[in-house]
């Protein structure tokens, strides 16, 4: 089954637009996991197993695994999600961007080595840096458009031909790059008006929306700006607010149960504004 | 010693502006290396040991190692370069681009895990996606500006405020992002007029220039467009033309000797136009 079909089924089955970002930072782990060789895997598996009925996707961030020499744990984590929770798509957040021959290697890494259902990519190098990923039919290619960080405006908000660069990217992807139907876009929650503008430009294309939770984006504004007529179309990502829900509480508390509670509240908060 | 100082010393000592890109593709390896578990490392070490007196830098491309589950071989390769050929800086070509907290993880990966002297990064997400790398004092941060692929024009050539996006990026980096002096830029050899324009905008800032050799850029035009008044300022990259110089010849031939021969010719061709 391809990424978009799997995503649509997960939206419906779990009644959820929530994507949980897996950004495992060992310095924030509960005490009993610290120092374990497989701490990243154990931590993420616990989060996944506690939330799999509440989400439409998982999004592991490869930087956290790479910084900790834990590529093998990332492989095992994605395998675990596919085996134990079939039907939940996995987005590898790696924001790749390079020329064709190199993009092919990155595609092999994401889709063959890790078995990801979708990959985030950077548009700065243009179409031929994105095209190689489409050879893996059915996999999702999620292009950065309008990012949720403050510096996102440095380039993305520049005027070009009477519109902003992020609008140009949205239109390029919708009208040219998406011929095979594999594309989605990253649009931050911190700018609801721009999320609404992207939704207008791209029709029903799925949007991956970081920036709620720890980054402060407003759930009501995000959902009403970004949802499709069917009340879906969004993968609203939350990472730290869910993963480290128990961090400030007493050490013995079950971090996975705390994560589940926040995931449940976040899913339900999103659902209040969907229809 | 910091990246720029090391680079300047290497320019002088080896009388060379040549950077050798290490993009190890096992399908192009000589027959006796195929199937070996450590083939990427053995291949790259042989290339390095045969060319270390001819280059100003090495640039391993992380995608080739990642696609082949060979991060450990990349670690060993960079360690080998530093130990056996001290004074040759290593640029990790990874084109990272992500928000602050994630950029910090990528910086740890590049500068601590791999011990790279410099890293390539993507500017699309703006200053706060580049700033975290500067905390590693003296390491080089090489920002994509004008790339050598055909699709590079899709975004980089858009007009914004009376100039092209790549010119805006060059100016942003030169006037704002480079406060600590750690920046360099990627500017492709396929567009010499644009290389000259970037040189005008950024003064003596080092430029990493891919696109000669297999990608077809012209050496004379590249050097005269991009060199500084001192006849340096460039890291002119060649990957495939050097690595696979022996590929089309008879199987028993020494691929490292063939690589050395092409590296020598390329360095000397560059030097003909430097002064």
Image (spheres, coloured by chain):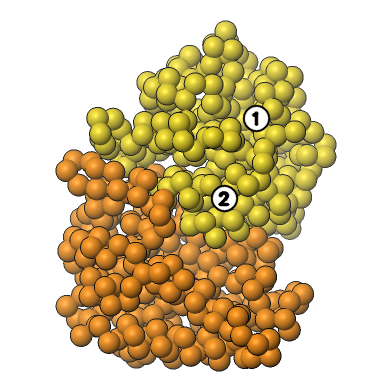
Chain colours: A yellow, B orange
Residue drawn where x is 63% and y is 33% of the image: A20
Q: Quadrant of residue B273?
A: bottom left
Q: Name the spot of residue B115 as percent of width and height, x first.
A: 51, 71
Task: Please give the count of numbered marks on the rendered protein.
Answer: 2
Residue drawn where x is 23% and y is 41% of the image: B160
Separation (CA) of disc 1 from disc 2: 19 Å
Query: Mark 1 falls on what kind of element?
Result: helix
Q: Closer to the camera: disc 1 or disc 2?
A: 2
Q: Name the spot of residue B194 as percent of width and height, x first.
A: 25, 60
In which quadrant of the rendered image does the N terminus of chain A lie?
top right
Q: Nearer the viewer, residue A181 or B115?
A: A181
Residue drawn where x is 58% and y is 13% of the image: A231
Tell me which chain the residue with mark 1 is part of.
A
Q: Quadrant of residue A119?
A: top right
Residue B43: mark: none
Tell me which chain the residue with mark 2 is part of.
A
Residue drawn where x is 24% and y is 48% of the image: B164
CA neighbours of label 1 inside 10 A, class few (<14), some (14 to 19), many (20+): many
Q: Nearer the viewer, residue A253 or B141?
A: B141
Residue A4: mark: 1
CA neighbours of label 2 inside 10 A, class few (<14), some (14 to 19), many (20+): some
């Amino acid at each position: 089954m391809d990424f978009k079909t799997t995503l649509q089924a997960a939206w419906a089955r779990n009644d959820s637009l929530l994507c949980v970002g897996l950004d495992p930072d060992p310095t924030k782990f509960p005490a009993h996991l610290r120092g374990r060789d497989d701490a990243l895997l154990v931590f993420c598996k616990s989060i996944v197993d506690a939330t799999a009925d509440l989400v439409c996707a998982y999004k592991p961030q490869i930087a956290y695994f790479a910084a900790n020499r834990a590529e093998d744990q990332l492989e095992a984590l994605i395998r675990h999600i596919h085996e134990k929770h079939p039907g939940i798509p996995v987005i590898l957040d790696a924001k790749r961007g390079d020329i064709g021959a190199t993009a092919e290697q990155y595609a092999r890494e994401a889709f063959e080595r890790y078995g990801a259902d979708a990959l985030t990519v950077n548009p700065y190098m243009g179409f031929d840096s994105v095209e190689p990923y489409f050879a893996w039919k059915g996999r999702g290619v999620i292009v950065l458009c309008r990012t949720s960080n403050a510096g996102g405006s440095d380039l993305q908000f520049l005027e070009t031909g009477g519109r902003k660069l992020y609008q140009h990217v949205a239109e390029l992807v919708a009208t040219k790059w998406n011929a095979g139907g594999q594309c989605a876009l990253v649009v931050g929650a911190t700018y609801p008006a721009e999320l609404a503008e992207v939704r207008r430009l791209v029709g029903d294309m799925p949007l991956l929306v970081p920036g709620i939770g720890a980054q402060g984006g407003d759930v009501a504004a995000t959902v009403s700006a970004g949802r499709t007529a069917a009340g879906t179309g969004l993968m609203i990502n939350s990472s730290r607010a869910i993963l480290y829900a128990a961090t400030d509480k007493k050490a013995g508390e079950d971090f996975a149960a705390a994560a589940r509670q926040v995931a449940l509240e976040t899913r339900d908060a999103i659902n209040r504004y969907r229809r």
